[in-house]
Image (spheres, rainbow, N blue to C red):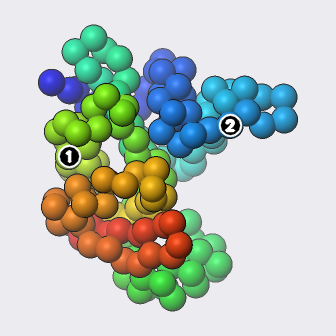
Amino acid sequence: MYTIVPYDHKYIDNVARLYEQVYSVKPWENATALEVSRSVIIEHTLRDTYLGLIALDEQDDVVGFVWGYDTPKNANIIRIVTKRMGAEWVEDTFLVEAFGVHFEHANTELTATLQQALIQTVQAQDFARLRIRIDTPRMDNLPSILQDKGWQELGALAHVKWMGYNI
């Protein structure tokens, strides 16, 4: 069984280790991969509209995470999203920036549980839609899991898929 809780900075190192694995983070300049992961997470948590959830197993270990924020309102993002996915995917849309599940839990109900918790949390914040960018093949099974839960493919380009969910 899993417990889904709002992101808490006390879990930063455990989340960073899992982020490092899921996103294949490499060392950069003088920073280790773990330090790079930690830095990315902190950068995201500082955004005004940041919202994050983590999944804990029965031993209180971090086995999943998801976070994001309101779609950035700069002209370039609006132009790209409107062109590729349609204008409705800009306004009132929560952008899922990171979604990861520990490989040992990848074929369990955790992915569905985490995405359902995200939908409920985002809905409570009055967003109308969610949008996620999925890098394949790193997350090969996520698109099919999301489609089974009512998400739709919004577009694809090379190794990237965009999917959306209307609340």
Q: Which residue is mark 2?
A: 26
Position of the N terminus, as image quadrant, is: top left
| 3D distance between C-alphas at marks 2 and 1 | 28 Å
Residue drawn 64% across and 80% down? 75
User: Neighbour class for label 2 at 10 Å: few (<14), some, many (≥20)?
Assistant: some
* Amino acid type, label 2: Lys
* In the image, residue 104 above or below residue 75: above
> Which of these two is toward me, 48 or 15?
15
Q: Horizontal and vertical percent for residue 70?
A: 46, 60
Q: Horizontal and vertical percent for residue 98?
A: 46, 48
Q: Horizontal and vertical percent for residue 59?
A: 27, 11
* In the image, residue 21 above or below residue 156: above
* Amino acid type, label 1: Ala
- Residue 12 lies left or right of residue 120; in this view the side is right
Residue drawn 84% across and 35% down? 29
Of helix, strand and loop, which one carries label 1? helix
> Which of these two is toward me, 29 or 68?
29
Q: Which residue is mark 1?
A: 112
* In the image, residue 75 above or below residue 26: below
Of the numbered discs 2 and 1, the one sitting upstream in the chain is 2
Residue drawn 26% across and 20% down? 57
Q: Horizontal and vertical percent for residue 143?
A: 31, 61
- Residue 14 lies left or right of residue 56; in this view the side is right
